[in-house]
Image (tube, coloured by chain):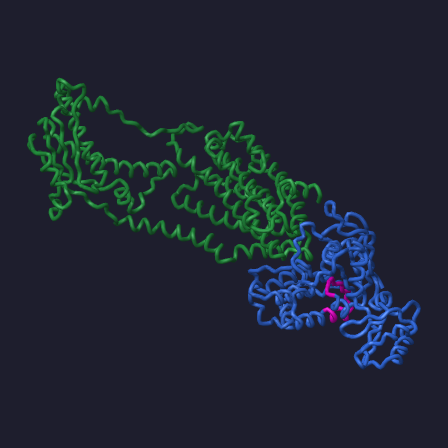
Amino acid sequence: MGHAIRMSKVRKTFGKKVAVEGIDLELPEGALYGFIGPNGAGKTTSIRMIMSILFPDSGELEVLGKKSAVESKDRIGYLPEERGLYRKMKVHSFLEHMGRLKGLDSGAPLRKTVMDWLERVELGDVAKKKCEELSKGMQQKVQFIACVLHEPDLLILDEPFSGLDPVNMRLLRDLIQEQHDAGRTVIFSTHVMQQAEQLCDHIVMIHEGKKVLDATLDEIRSRHDPRTILFTPLNGEGDASLAAVAGVGSVEHTERGYEAHLGANADPVSVMRAIMEACPVTRVELRRPTLEDVFVEIVEGTGGGRMPAPEPTVAVSTGDLA
Amino acid sequence: MSKIFHIARREFAATALTKGFIIGAFVVPAIFVAVIPLIVILTMNAEAPKVEGTVAVIDRTGEVGASVQDSIDREIERSRKQVKEAVEKSQELAKELTGQSAPLPMGAEGAMDMAMGAVPELRVEVLAPNTDEEAEKDRLRPSAAEGEDNDALLALAVIDADAVLKADDQDSFGSFQVFVRPKLDDRVIDTVRDAIRSAVREARYTANGYDPNTIKALTSVQSRRTKEISETGEERGSMEALTMLLPIAFMLLLMMSVMIGGQYLLTTTVEEKSSRVVELLLSATSPMQLMTGKILGQMCVGLLLLTIYSGLGIGALITFSLGDILPVSAVIYLFIFFILAYFMIASLLAAVGSAVNDMREAQSLQTPVMILIMIPYILWLPISRDPNSTFATVLSFVPPVSPFVMMLRMTSSQASDIPFWQPLLSVLVGIIGAYCCVWMAAKVFRVGLLMYGKPPNFRTLVKWVRMA
């Protein structure tokens, strides 16, 4: 199986600021990759370089087997983070225009494809409206259609979920999943970890211009296993003697119950059994690390300082294009 | 290529197929065209309002009064003749220009009457030299004049006693004073004043023993229309007005279509950037394709306007049988120079549009480009006066003003003196200039499109050109 994207030692600076510093990345064909990282980490810059909208200062880049995306733009679908529509244009003419720019032949088949897509995302009745009359969520769906209309082999989605309500978020997730099932390579960036967790089988994390994580979800989970057992005692009161259970390093009282941190080399299964024997519990579970934990751990661990901003993506004033 | 074509097509459609554009480009000129015959019809049957009435004269000299009626009649006759001459002159001009006698358009005489004012019918009432001035002035008052239209007193002239014969203790002659009714047509006032002045003058001639007719004959020198001797030695009336108008008309046409096309390009570029549709477009096209498509699309808009307006102008000239004063080569060059000038100006404006965040920021950056266009407009007079001066010649090879200046020179009266290689060199220089402008613009365009935030100044733009 070939590679959809291959980057090696790709570096990009804007003035004195290093936006991307020596990223190596290989994306196999047909994969579904999530691109995560805090705001300003270099995700959009990396994606723009993959799209040949920006050009790297140094390093090698290969997209769909070509030296640059310029030669294979018609095989790529791209949903930029900074996206808009022609305000005065009708929805269907806008999509037809985008289709033609993507190399589709104009005419009845294109019109039909556009209408079919609009029906699919429940926008059939606004086809003749002007783009400016649409709500932000509707516009986003139109933009998504614009990037899958030409059935691309590679789909690059920059923050596709920002600003969508839960219903539309699910709709979009299904559509992305469908593209993936059809064998297309999909890469999308987000900083909402649950989405990455739900969709992706492989995660790439960029932080301060460097790749800090490139693994499958399972690998990440096992690598960043917090080795913590959660339990809630039946009588509501914890027992100090629990600390004496073999393998438990320390016990912490939290709002939801207790957290027992495993000691080094302790086997989680035997420790759980020991806890149940030590005190009757309503619940005991091995805590699975969420992607968010991993994310926060990496960002804070590298001294990057800030927590990932929880607010929805705002149109970043990228004076420095970061 | 097909992507460029699709972008150009959308650009053209989004600009030229809007209500605002159609109204501006078609309806307004159409209204102008429709209004011209309307004006002719309206003026054809229009007659200037007649002015009738009495002019009272108090002649304290006792020597002028008798000749005032004569003088006024002569004055009226003179203005009638002026109207007739003006009509004949315009016929003559048209004949000279076209080489055939064109019948005067219907209604022209009525229109002339309107323009020159009605020829008044005035009666003179000479009052006794010792009449009381104040009592007569009362007759001019509106209330008194009402109800006696036919015999209304329009004006009262009082001639000083020493107007004809100088009083011994004075250095100069006396004069006269005219009182008129309120809101009297100033052309009637002029007639009365001129008539009395010449009556007084004649009375002075007689009193000093000269014959007024001899004096008049001696002082009158008729001036004839200036004639030009052409290369073939034939005489023709010089067409100063037209030869001045033709170059400026051509240049304005050129400037207008370049500016409108360029302005639309700037607006749509800023709009694409501020609405953030641009990155979606860039996922399908390269910046160069996008810019080329946009430039070509708006060029079609400019060409459309140029064709409409030059077509109207040529149509008008042919209607008035003045078609031959327009050299065909000038029209061809008009379109060539349009394309060159447009590429230079529009690509610079596209670069400006890509660099800014909104129209407000665009204003300040586009000013230098606009000044470039204004240079030939400011220099219009010196260039068209002496189109083959060193200054004008050099300027016609300096892009981006070269197309405008060459156009001015080629439509001027001395166009035949321009060596044939000069327009060709100007075109060549224009092509090089257009190439450089597009090249620079493409660099700014590529960087600028994705730059948001602080509006750039010229130093940043230069940096982008170097960087890209």
Q: Residue placed at 57% from the left, 69% from the top?
A: A126
Q: Decide: is B439 above or below B217.
A: below
Vertical arrangement, residue A129 with respect to residue B230, above or below = below
Residue at the (72%, 72%) spot, across then down:
A174
Q: Quadrant of residue B3?
A: bottom right
Which chain does green denote in the image?
A: B
Image x and y of residue A96, in percent: 62, 63
- Tell me residue A36's x, y (percent): 76, 61
Residue closest to the eye, B316 or A55? A55
Residue A71: tell me if it is visible.
Answer: no
Is residue A225 or residue A186 the one in the foreground?
A: A225
Extent of the magenta region: A176-192
Relative to residue B40, is residue A291 drawn left or right? Answer: right
Q: Which x, y percent locates residue A64?
A: 79, 59
Query: Would you say residue A201 sits in the magenta stretch?
Result: no
Please state which of residues B182 and B243 is positioned toward the viewer in this rendering: B182
Residue B94: percent from left, percent from top: 35, 39
Q: Is residue A149 visible?
A: yes
Q: In this view, does B228 lie to the left or right of B124?
A: right
Quadrant in the picture for the C terminus of chain B: top right
Q: Which chain is blue?
A: A
In the rendered image, residue A186 lying in the magenta stretch gets the answer yes
Counting the numbered discs, the total is 0
In the picture as drawn, the residue positioned furthest to the front comes out as A240
A78 horizontally vs B153: left or right: right
| Relative height, residue A235 to residue A209 (above, below) | below
Please state if B256 lies on the left or on the right of B289 as rendered: left
Viewer-closest of A211 and B125: A211
